Structures are given as structure tokens and as C-alpha cells.
Image (spheres, coloured by chain):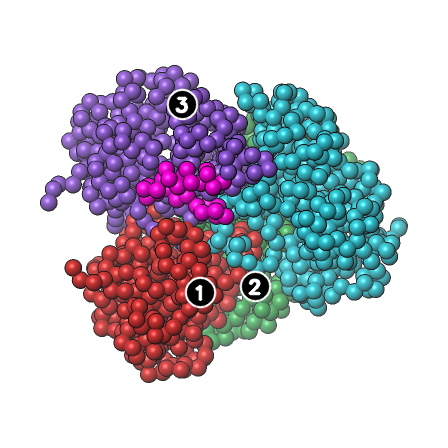
Chain colours: A red, B green, C cyan, D purple
Amino acid sequence: MTTKKRVAVIGASGYAGAEVVRLISGHPHVILTLLTSRQYAGQPYDNIFPAFNERINLSLESFSLDDAVQKADIFFLALPHKASMNIAAPLINAGKKVIDLSADFRFKNQSMYENYYQPHAFPQLLKKAVYGLCEINHLEISKADLIGNPGCYPTSVLLPLIPLLKEKLIDLTGIIVDSKSGVSGAGRSPSLGTLFCEVNEGFKAYKVAEHRHEPEMNENLSLAAGENVQILFVPHLIPMTRGIVSTIYVRSQNDEQKLRACLQTAYENCPFVRVLTEGRLPNSAHVRGTNFCDIGIKFSKEKGVAVIVSTIDNLIKGAAGQAVQNMNIMLGFSESAGIDAMPFPV
Amino acid sequence: MTTKKRVAVIGASGYAGAEVVRLISGHPHVILTLLTSRQYAGQPYDNIFPAFNERINLSLESFSLDDAVQKADIFFLALPHKASMNIAAPLINAGKKVIDLSADFRFKNQSMYENYYQPHAFPQLLKKAVYGLCEINHLEISKADLIGNPGCYPTSVLLPLIPLLKEKLIDLTGIIVDSKSGVSGAGRSPSLGTLFCEVNEGFKAYKVAEHRHEPEMNENLSLAAGENVQILFVPHLIPMTRGIVSTIYVRSQNDEQKLRACLQTAYENCPFVRVLTEGRLPNSAHVRGTNFCDIGIKFSKEKGVAVIVSTIDNLIKGAAGQAVQNMNIMLGFSESAGIDAMPFPV
Amino acid sequence: MTTKKRVAVIGASGYAGAEVVRLISGHPHVILTLLTSRQYAGQPYDNIFPAFNERINLSLESFSLDDAVQKADIFFLALPHKASMNIAAPLINAGKKVIDLSADFRFKNQSMYENYYQPHAFPQLLKKAVYGLCEINHLEISKADLIGNPGCYPTSVLLPLIPLLKEKLIDLTGIIVDSKSGVSGAGRSPSLGTLFCEVNEGFKAYKVAEHRHEPEMNENLSLAAGENVQILFVPHLIPMTRGIVSTIYVRSQNDEQKLRACLQTAYENCPFVRVLTEGRLPNSAHVRGTNFCDIGIKFSKEKGVAVIVSTIDNLIKGAAGQAVQNMNIMLGFSESAGIDAMPFPV
Amino acid sequence: MTTKKRVAVIGASGYAGAEVVRLISGHPHVILTLLTSRQYAGQPYDNIFPAFNERINLSLESFSLDDAVQKADIFFLALPHKASMNIAAPLINAGKKVIDLSADFRFKNQSMYENYYQPHAFPQLLKKAVYGLCEINHLEISKADLIGNPGCYPTSVLLPLIPLLKEKLIDLTGIIVDSKSGVSGAGRSPSLGTLFCEVNEGFKAYKVAEHRHEPEMNENLSLAAGENVQILFVPHLIPMTRGIVSTIYVRSQNDEQKLRACLQTAYENCPFVRVLTEGRLPNSAHVRGTNFCDIGIKFSKEKGVAVIVSTIDNLIKGAAGQAVQNMNIMLGFSESAGIDAMPFPV
């Protein structure tokens, strides 16, 4: 029996970090050896997440490079943007595998990143990093050391659109993405806007046409199309914890069958993308707690517009689950190892 | 002191009917005298809605035309489609004022109604009926005896779009309406799809491009534009009780200021439409429990698309509140009598 | 026409303060003239609570005693404990009426207050203050200048128990109060524990047998009984915004009819207490948005225990609504002026 | 490699049945071979529960004894009371193992069952059946053919109380159980009371001191105590999908440490009972999606009352999870096989 690879979660006190911890704890081929947090260093992890009582026995530590390099082989970074790149760089230099859940390594185009975030301190690493959209970049991921794990909204939008763009089945202009997300996407730091009473029993749009996930989507869609694609992206907040639904409007000269067939073919060997049959539409509840992306299509012939509805659990396929999927691909495990839980009926 | 007009609510056991009852009970100029229900006839009304304990002392009765004609002057019909027209007709013949919350009298175009609903038994009444979108059809409403009270989704869509179409500030083609509704819009009849556990913590699209509110919107938008307008309408279900948010995508050669100014001018004397200032976007929570329609605009110059977000409480401005507003206009009361409650901060 | 009394809300940026603002804005006999907040001074009030757009035109100011004394006649203090007493004292000295929503003036027993809160700087005012449980202390309230507005949990517990204790219909020992509250009771300051994702889809007990409302209840129950009463109080958090339900277990030698009759008699002229008839039990949804306290009783003969269930909207009868009711009594208005809104059917 | 045992779920269209399906699908040692439903016979299972798309490929069948006996070795019955016993009996006669999730085989005392349910058609089977409270009746379960799977409320109450009663650490009289349950406990049949809008944002008690789980608890508590124990049981409905919290009030001459130590000892080898350390209290969110029962204790020395708070996921440890745990014990598998999923952090 070979020794199991050792996993560290850097920034384990947020929701995405905790989801990585949950998934890694149930993973058959790796073992959790290091959890760090600046804010909660020294505390047992189940003080911070009492759900993990008797299941996670580690305590949180401050991050120390020397110590980290000793303790783990694979690193999941669940840190704020900027903080992330400063930790990723020395880990890569030390020969570690790094899966970064921040935006720091998602962009090919450095200036695009810098327009929307901040100056990038490691542009050479940006080139080396692979955008970890597993179903699309599987081959590059399998050879990568550094993954920029996709944003939650982008995952829900790129999976349905990229195959259609590659096959030139839809128009490049006029794409509208009306997305809706549960509240966990906003993270675990206390803020007025995510208080229960501020969110409950309300629904709103926010950051209309100015969300930072828009350029991330545009870069990857353009790459798929081989031409410049600029979507219009409008996110909304749903009064629920987990789940993203993206309703995508694209013009097309083709028909529903052709669009669906394209996606079915593209994803026929992908365990986590379910292209729904005619007449079915996705519901975020059906993917909650799973790494699935469900995609439904309804074509309005009269308007020449396809309505594509996709849904993911934002913390899993939109963050931690896809991160583990990336690890599986990088390390040659079964792609679904540790992330193949059955969905809940309710 | 003059005698107060007497009000009947026919079909008082559903949510819209109960909201009419609530509003009429607090109305300064009318008095509630008759509540009917087939299913619950004979029962005290607060058996059905215990919230009304000690506030509503009436019992539900079976509908009888003779009795109804004796007991009330103004009739709110909160009945299923078809059932409604059969009761409205004799009441109108008996000289009563009728505000119908079903779709039976919303259409000018009889065949359009019949395509989406059923044969219409009283086409001559259809001609006589006024579409009760208060801010738009104020004058006709003031002279009407029979009101087709608008659907909830249409109210949220027509109020922002009609002034823009009248002023020819937006393109007539390519309008996309991505609407989201709370669950109360589905009514109070037990069904699997509206059970708590089926709705809670989930979000989905439904009836994509085939909802019966689409032709209702098209008819009224076309009327305003003076040309045929065909929108693409996609409704979604939000896990909350009250509220509709419509995110509307329209192409325009104009800019945000011009569009906002048009709406501000159109509604400057309307107590229930709040056109939000630059940078503000609506939240359904801010109109919950009120007759407001809040409208925000964000223009994407780059894409030439205006994103218009509107919100209403589907049971109030989208049903019972607008019905009472119609009554106020018909009877010459202050337009906001009985429906001017302050919004809740939370 | 007489000039309307002018009202100030000191600490208007929290939920209780905002509810006072909402209720005062719709009040027929007073006018809102001053809103203060340390944190948001200078901002239009509807920046903080956008629901009030076009309905409240005041801006928030820093509190200044001289200015406050000029601008208002009646003061609602919605401040943290301790901060409150330091503002109440000079206002009382200036001849103003003060209704304090904090705990600072709720206790007769100074050392009890000091055990659970902090040293009291104005013990002589503590003696002068009246505990504003309207239905019980109506007469004293009508003569008072300074009101200690009751806590939310205590209101839900004292209203059902005080008449039973006064009439000696229940045992003084062994009273157990199992209360459940919506999240708005925890206030509007961002904190981990009240984030949407931390509260949603979960239920928990907290501060078991050590909540500061326990001594407040004990003092008032003992006063009613004429003997020392010490309840066991266990609060819980419900994943909803508004509402408290208290399930109270008391031993009694009497029967259900006798207990119910006692409460019915005690509250027969009280517009806001609804003693439910046999077989009915309260639901917090039926009092949401209202100043009602609903009380139901089920007696287990076999065990000799009466189960009394009461419910209020914690922000209204448990805070702002009762505060306005106190003002109405102090100023000789109709007791229900401005707080008699109909409940919602759903 | 040995052949896997084959599992049938009879009555697979409800929530408990669907949870059994979910858990069995992920179970390492058994295989799902038959799903039945009267209402949905002939339909693919993922038509009824779309979450199972691509994960469950079986269709629902009508129940036929001959067919069932051919197709499966172990039977989970998720049927209404009465329907259950009529199917269990012939299956037992055919030599099958049966785990019944209804109340039909939970009682030792036939007349107690008949008082609260209906006449029992198979009293001899009642004697043979074992009450499947796994941690308590482990040995009998390991030898049983027929299991009466415990009710959800009883599971949450019996696990904390039975060891304390066995060790005579608490008083037998005056036990009060104030329980709160999520809505899924009410099942999947459409009814007014479980509609989203009727439940959302409300909290209520129901069936006070007359719920059918009370005698089930009394029988098992009395058995543990060796004397007659009669609790007072008051259930409430929480506006959430999954989870039960029971707050239990017991008088005791002992102290918190002694009570906690008793439970820790009783459950030290039980993977699914977590006795929380001093100062910690359970939250239903921490056990959601798991087979855990979390128990916290706070002793009020002054009152001589221990407040014991326990929580389970009502569909898992309160139904399907415990049913699978029973199967594991009956068949000699690891007790946690297939039901050891990590809890969610949020």
C-alpha cells in the first residue's frame, strides 16, 4: 500500500475552505494534514465549524511556509485575492501542487486581471497556471502544477456555452446571462448585506453589468469561440444558502435538438454534467450538496433565441468540489473520487 | 354622513381574495358585507385565515346572485378563470361595479384570450371591460364598470416598459423579460409543487417562453408602442412568499439618464411607482406588504442594452392592492385610500 | 386644529428604531421630527432603509441634547443598554417624555439590574420609571414621564402569566418557559451568528437558563404573585425574521376552562391580546406585522400541567409597537392609534 | 467476491422512502433492485425525484408479493400505517428481512398501539418485532427479522433519556419534552398545512399533549426505567425542511457532570451519538444530512432541572438513516456503512 498524499487547506475558516475540508475528509486517496487560518489560529477546527465535531481533529495553525512545505504535498488556497498569489508562488517554487480558489490565477490576460483586481506580482506564474474548468481543460489540468479554480458564476455559464461556441451553433453577440446565487457565495465575513434579516424574504439584482466574473467569462468564451465574445452579466441574490441558477439567452439559427445534441456529445463522458432531456429544466435543489452541473434548454423558434438554464451548487461545482475534481485529475485519481455523493431528494 | 359603499369578495378563500379582504377591512370609505367560497361556505372566515381572528367577523357563504345583488355594491372576483366571467356578467347586468382578478377580462383581443385560456362566453363584455393598470389607464378606469385586473408579472413589466415604448426610447424587438416570483403567486390549493419542502432552498425556471402572461404583456406593450411587440418571457420561482422581481433587457440608442427621466416624468404624480435614482436597484423586500412598484435602471453603454429591474408585492400591486386602487379610481376616492401602508424596514 | 406632538427616535438605525419610525410615520396624532444615529449621521434615512424611499424624508443626525430638546416632545430611545440611561436622564430633566426600549429602566430592583447589566448611573430615575407592559400597568403608564419598555421575550411570557398568578390559579414553582425567537431580535449589527447562512435551515437553543430576560420576567411575575417566582427560561433561535413563540409549562389544580376564562376576563377590553378559543393554538405568522399577542391554552389533566402558548411579533408588541402603545396611553390617545394594522393572511 | 444482497424500497415516492433510496444507492454492500409505488407505478424514478437523474435508473412498480419475493432479500417499508403491516406479514413468512418505517411494529403493547392507531392484524408479529433504536437495542436487532423503525421525535428523545433512566440519575415524573421539527416530517402528500406560504415565516405548536409519538416514547422510557414513565410532549413546526430539536426538562438530584458522564459512557462506542462537551449546545444544522444525534446538557442547579437538548436530521437518524443502520446491524456489516457522510459546514 502506498502512502496517501497529504493535503493542506490554507484559509480553512471560510465556507469554500470548509467545503474542501469536508470533501477531503471523505476522500479515499488523500489525507488532510494541515489547516491554516490567520484569524482562528490555535483553535480546534470544530470550534469554528461545530458540525465537524468528532470528525475533524486538527487545529487551525498560522501559515508558515517552512512548516507547510514539510506537512503537505497538495495545497488548496481558499484565501482572499492577492493574499493567495503571495502564498502560491513559494509553494510552487517548493515543488508543490497548488489549487487556488481565488481569482489570482484565473486569467490568461494579465492586464484584464489587473483592471478588475490589482497589480499581479507573479505574471510568469499566471502563464504557467491552468484555468481549472475540468470538463473543458482536462488535458492541461492533468499536467498542471498550479490551477486557477474557476469562479462560481463562470462555471455555471461556461459549461453550457463553450461547446456551443466551439461548434459555432450560437451567435457571438447579444448573449445575456441572468444569474441568481444563494447567499453562501458572499462568504463568511460578517457584513450587513448578508445578515439573515437583510436577505430573507427578499430578492434583488446587484453589480449589474459590473461584476468581476464578467471578464473571467468573456476571456474563456472568447477563447472557445476563437473570437471576441462580450456577454452582458446580471447577478441576483436568492434568499437561500446554496445554489446558482444561470438563465442564458443566446440567439441561434439552429434548433433545440441540435443545441442539446451538441452538449450531450460534449459531456457524454463527464460524470458531473447532466444535460437534461427535452421538457426538463433544472432546479438548484437537485444539485445541492453535489458536484453536478445540470443544464436544460428551451428554444423559442419564434424569437430565434435559446434559453439555456444551468445550475450548480456554488460551494461545490462552483468552488470546493471542482477544486477536488482538479486535484483528482492532476494526481491521476478517478475524476469523481470523493465528490460523487448522491443528491438529496429534498 | 353618507352611507359607505358595500363590498363583496367572491372567492375569498385564496390568497388574493384574502388580501382584498385585508385591505378592504382597513379602508376608510367602504365596508365589507359579503364573503363567498364554494369550498368553505358556512365557516367563519377566521377559521380559514386565523390571522383575522377578532378582526373579521363575517362567515363565508355560497354565492347566490340574488343575495349578492342585495348585499353589495362593488364586487371583487377572486375566482379561477372561466368561473369568473359567469359571475361577472349577471352582476354587470344588475348594475354593479365589478373588479375581476382573473384573466377573463384582461384581453382586448378575444381570440388571443381564447388561444391561451378557453372560449369566452361574453365577448361583448370583453369590449366593455377596462384593463386595470391604474397608472396607465387611469381615465378609462374612472369611467368603467368592469375591470380586468392585470396579472402579477404583467404589472411588473408593463409599468416600466409602457412609457419607454410610448416615447419610442427603446427598440421594439429583442426584449427579454427574466422574471422571478415568490410562491404565493401559485395560489392556496394544495399541490406537490408548492409544498414547503419542494420549494425551500431551491430555485428554478418554469414555463419558459410559454407562460400565459406573455400574451397579456404583448397585447398591452403593442398597444403602447402602436406596433407589434413580442417579448420573450421566462418566469422563475423564488423560495419566498411574496414578491416579484422582473429583470428586463431592452436595446436602446439612448442613455440611462434619458430612460430614467422618461419614467420619472411618466410617474411623477403616481403615489405607487418609485423610480429609483442613479445607482440604486430595487429589492422585493422593500415593497413587501405595500402597493409600490419600484423601478431601477442600469444602462450598459458598451452593449447598448438597458437593464431595467422592477419589483412589486405580487399579492398587492400584482393583485389585491391594484384591485383596490382600481376601486378607488372608479369611485372617485383618493387613489391611495386604504393601500398606503408604510413598507417594513425588514 | 391643535399642533401635533413632535417625536424623536434616538438610535434610528437598528431594527427596533426603524419600526418605531415606520409606526410613527403612519400615526394620526404625532409627527416625526428627529432621527439620530452615531454611525450614519448625515445620511438620508432612506439610504439606510431603502424601503422608506419617498416616505421618510429626514436625514440622520448626531444626537445633541440642545438640538433634541428644541426639536421634539416625545423621545423613543432605541439604543444599547447604558448608552440609553445617559441620554434619558437629561431629557427627563428637560421635561420630555421618554420611552426607553433598552433594559435600563425596566427593573425596580437596582441590584438585580446591576447583576445582569452594569452599574446604574441614575437610580432615582429607576424608581420614577414605569415598566411599560401596557395591558398590566395601564394606569401608571398614563401618568408616567419615563417608560422602561419591556423586553420581547418578557412581553410574550408576562401577558399570559400575570393574570393567572394574580388570581392564584397556577403553582408558583416549576414554571418552565421554552421560547423561540426570529432572528431580528438579535439586532442589525453584523455578526457571524446572524449571517443568513449560519441561521438558515438550522434551529438551536442558546443562553440556556442564563438569558438576561429571565430576571426581568422573575421580577414582574413575583410582583404579580406577591411572592417570589423563579422561572426556568430557555430561548431558541428560529430561522425566520419576525416572531416569538413562548411555550409555557405551569402546574395547576384548575382546568383549561378556568385558566382561559381568567385570561379572557383580564383582557376583554384590550385590543391587542387575543385569547384563543378552545382547540385553537397560536402561530407567529398570524401576528406578524401587528401589535397582537395571541394566547392559546391546552391543559393536560393527566399531568396537571397547563401548556400555554403565546406569540407576538418581537419587533412590534415585543418592541416598537408596545413603545407606541405606551406613548398613546401617556398622551391620552386611543390606545391603538397608529398600531392597528390588519394582520396578513400569509 | 460474494453476491451483494438485494434491497427493495416499498413506498418509494415519499421523503423517507427516497432517503432510503439515496442511502442504499451509495451503500457499499447492498444493491437496489426494486422500488414500488401505487401512485406512480410505471414511471422512471427520476421523474418523481429529478435530483436522482442519471443516478437511479429503476422505474417504480406496483407492489406484487410474488415479484417482490423474487427480486429482493431485504425490504424497507415506507408506507402509511396499516398498509405496512399487510405487506410485512407475507414478506416475513417468505423468509425476508423487513425494516418497517411506519408505526405498525414499534409497540410491544398491542392495546397501546390500537388506542392510538387501529386494530392490529398481526399481533404475533408484534411480539417478534424488535424496536430498532440501534444504540439501545443493538443485540436484539442483530438477531431480528422484523424491525419497527423508531419515530423521528422518539429517536431524539429516547437516546438522551434512556441511559439516564437506566442509571436512575433523573426523576421519573415531571419530564417535559418540547420538540421542534422541520416540515419534511409531515411527508410529501399535498396538504394546505404544508404549503410553502402556510409554513414559511411562521412557528407554531400542534397536537399539544396528543401526538401519537407520546405513547411510543412512554413505552420505551418505562422499559428503560423499569417503572411507568409518562412524559408531557409538545411538538412544534419549524419553517425549515430537515431537522428535529428536542428540549427536554428533567428534574435531577445529580449534577451536569454526572449526567454528561453517563451519556458519554453509554455512547462511547457509538459512531452516531455525539455527547457535546460542557458549554456546547447542539444546532440542527450541524447534523443535517447525517445520521448523527447530537446531545447537549445544561443543568440549572438552582431549579434542580437539567435541560437536555438533542438534535437529529428527522429524515436520516429519524427515519431512513436509522433504517439503514438497522440493516447494517442485522446483516453484520459495519454499523456506519453507507451512512457515514461528513456533515456540511453550512
Which secondary structure lies at badge 1? loop
Tell which of B12 and A289 is nearer to you: A289
> In this picture, is A308 found above or below B191?
below
Q: Nearer the viewer, residue A273 or B97?
A: A273
Q: Same chain for marks 3 and 1?
A: no
Disc 1 marks which amino acid? Answer: Ala
Tell me: residue D130, above or below residue B314.
above
Give SS at disc 2.
Answer: loop
- How many numbered dots are placed on residues in this image? 3
Contact check, label 2 and label 1, Cβ < 8 Å: no
Q: Nearer the viewer, mark 2 or mark 3?
A: 3
B252 to C197, vertically: above or below: below
User: To which chain does the residue with label 3 belong?
Assistant: D
Residue corresponding to mark 2: B281
* Residue A74, image x, y percentages: 29, 68
Q: Which mark is residue A41?
A: 1
Q: Is residue C97 at all visible to an observer of this figure?
A: yes
Quadrant of the image for the N terminus of chain B? top right
The CA span between labels 2 and 1 is 40 Å
Return the chain for callout 2. Answer: B
Q: Identify the residue under disc 3.
A: D226
